[in-house]
Image (spheres, rainbow, N blue to C red):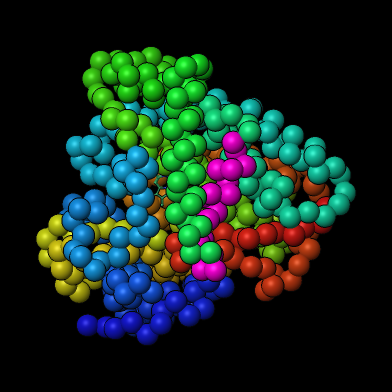
């Protein structure tokens, strides 16, 4: 059995070099967490894709053996979310919300999303320098998802701060993650209470109606007879949609802009052919996707992954980023190539937990890039790319800041 040899070394700045070594030498590799927990890290495309769809792998932490890595412990009011559930609960809850995120439904957000992007760009003026993550890549998705859910303006910044703490905990502040969780619980409790008092035309009010009256959201958001939500499930769903809706999209927009600014030939092609933007978003997702790892999974019985026996209850980490750079699937995988065939990339997952917000993530990133290219023709990187700092996280890939001039 392969053993761990500090696979985390160098993982933050350039995880892909480490993934490459693992993919070739130890594609199903035993790794140890700093807390002494253990997990299997899977890095080849075929193995990762097959595992994502395997009925033998469960995201339900109740299948975990003691000593297996389970990640941050959240209270049940945040943890009872889709990413930790299997059928029938997963099916019941996903069915309730999936219609709010269909391509058709999301297309209706195109104009408001573009208006938000334009407002943020108006605030930048026509010339200057800024950190594009703070000024644009973060506020755009948080505004879009908060508008959709119905989160009032004054709480949006708080949510961003807590999310940052959870995704990339600062080792010098060991209690910060716990404090952020407590603060988030308070935030969602108050938010739901306020919405119950004053429902509005937003997704959260609709979900509260499902919880309180029973029923399922339809395309037009009317309730139909059927399913129910518990209070924990309601709050956890709101938490997941807000968290997932903001966090990953911010990182993808940031990485995509960096990709363009460091590949002037491809930037020029895209400026000349903006109709290729949607396809480009797929390549940005494959090449520098924000979710390095899928959510932890646990075999419900002993199973084989890539020829290695993994025991029931051990933690399995599926590296979406390593799979997306597997040369067996994507030739010359480290090259950003906006013209390549990206079909089958795993940046948004695969199988029943495939990203619920995929149509929103795609359209939002496309709009963010097209507004930026149209409005800031002189956009340029204001730093040496090698000096840019990435979030200190083994799960979430994203720039801490993206200094630009325009
Ligand atoms: C670029 C942006 C995004 C990326 C890269 C991304 C990535 C992913 C991935 C990889 C998964 C599957 C995780 C797994 O199976 O382990 C997932 C699931 C999910 N995503 Fe996204 N996501 C993005 C944006 C969004 C947005 C905008 C929303 C808003 C609704 C969202 C909501 C969700 C939800 C609710 C799930 C859980 C689905 C389930 O378990 O059935 N995501 N996402």
Q: Residue at x 74, y 34 (%)?
A: 119
Note whether 29 is above or below 265 in the view shown: below
**Horizontal and vertical percent for residue 386?**
67, 74
Q: Residue at x 76, y 40 (%)?
A: 121
**Horizontal and vertical percent for residue 178?**
44, 54
Q: Which quadrant: the N terminus?
A: bottom left
Q: Is residue 82 visible?
A: no
Give the residues in magenta: 155-172
User: Which residue occupies the foreground of this view, 251 or 340?
Assistant: 251
- The prevailing secondary structure element of the residues shown in magenta is helix
Question: Residue 220 lies in magenta, yes or no?
Answer: no
Note whether 339 is above or below 371 in the view shown: below
Q: Can residue 7 be seen in this view?
A: yes
Q: Is residue 396 left or right of residue 258?
A: left
User: Which residue occupies the foreground of this view, 349 or 156?
Assistant: 156
Q: Residue at x 44, y 76 (%)?
A: 8
| Quadrant of the rendered image containing residue 310 | bottom left
**Horizontal and vertical percent for residue 349?**
38, 51
Q: Extreme left residue here?
A: 301
Question: Residue 164 lies in magenta, yes or no?
Answer: yes
């Amino acid at each position: 059995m392969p053993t761990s040899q500090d696979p985390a070394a160098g993982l933050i700045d350039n995880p892909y070099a480490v993934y490459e070594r693992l993919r070739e030498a130890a594609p199903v590799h035993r790794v140890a967490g700093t807390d002494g927990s253990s997990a299997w890290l899977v890095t080849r495309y075929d193995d990762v894709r097959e595992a994502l769809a395997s009925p033998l792998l469960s995201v339900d932490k109740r299948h975990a053996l003691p000593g297996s890595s389970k990640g941050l412990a959240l209270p049940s009011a945040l943890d009872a979310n889709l990413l930790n559930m299997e059928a029938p609960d997963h099916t019941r809850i996903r069915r309730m919300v999936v219609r709010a995120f269909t391509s058709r439904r999301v297309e209706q957000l195109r104009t408001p999303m573009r208006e938000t992007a334009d407002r943020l760009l108006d605030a930048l003026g026509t010339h200057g320098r800024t950190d594009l993550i703070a000024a644009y890549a973060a506020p755009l998705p948080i505004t879009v998802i908060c508008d959709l859910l119905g989160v009032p303006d004054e709480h949006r910044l708080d949510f961003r701060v807590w999310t940052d703490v959870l995704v990339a905990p600062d080792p010098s502040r060991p209690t910060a993650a716990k404090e952020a969780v407590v603060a988030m619980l308070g935030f969602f409790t108050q938010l739901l209470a306020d919405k119950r008092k004053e429902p509005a035309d937003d997704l959260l009010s609709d979900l509260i109606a499902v919880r309180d009256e029973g029923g399922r959201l339809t395309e037009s958001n009317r309730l139909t007879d059927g399913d129910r939500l518990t209070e924990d499930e309601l709050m956890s769903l709101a938490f997941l949609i807000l968290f997932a809706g903001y966090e990953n999209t911010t990182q993808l927009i940031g990485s995509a802009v960096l990709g363009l600014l460091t590949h002037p030939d491809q930037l020029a092609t895209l400026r000349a052919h903006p109709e290729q933007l949607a396809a480009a978003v797929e390549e940005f997702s494959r090449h520098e996707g924000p979710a390095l790892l899928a959510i932890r999974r646990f075999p419900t019985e002993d199973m084989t992954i890539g020829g290695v026996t993994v025991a029931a209850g051990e933690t399995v980490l599926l590296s979406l980023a390593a799979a997306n750079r597997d040369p067996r699937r994507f030739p010359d995988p480290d090259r950003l190539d906006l013209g390549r065939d990206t079909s089958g990339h795993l940046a948004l997952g695969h199988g029943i937990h495939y990203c619920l917000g995929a149509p929103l993530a795609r359209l939002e990133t496309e709009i963010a890039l097209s507004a930026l290219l149209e409005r800031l023709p002189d956009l340029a990187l204001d730093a040496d790319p090698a000096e840019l700092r990435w979030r200190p996280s083994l799960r979430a890939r994203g720039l801490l800041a993206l200094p630009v001039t325009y």
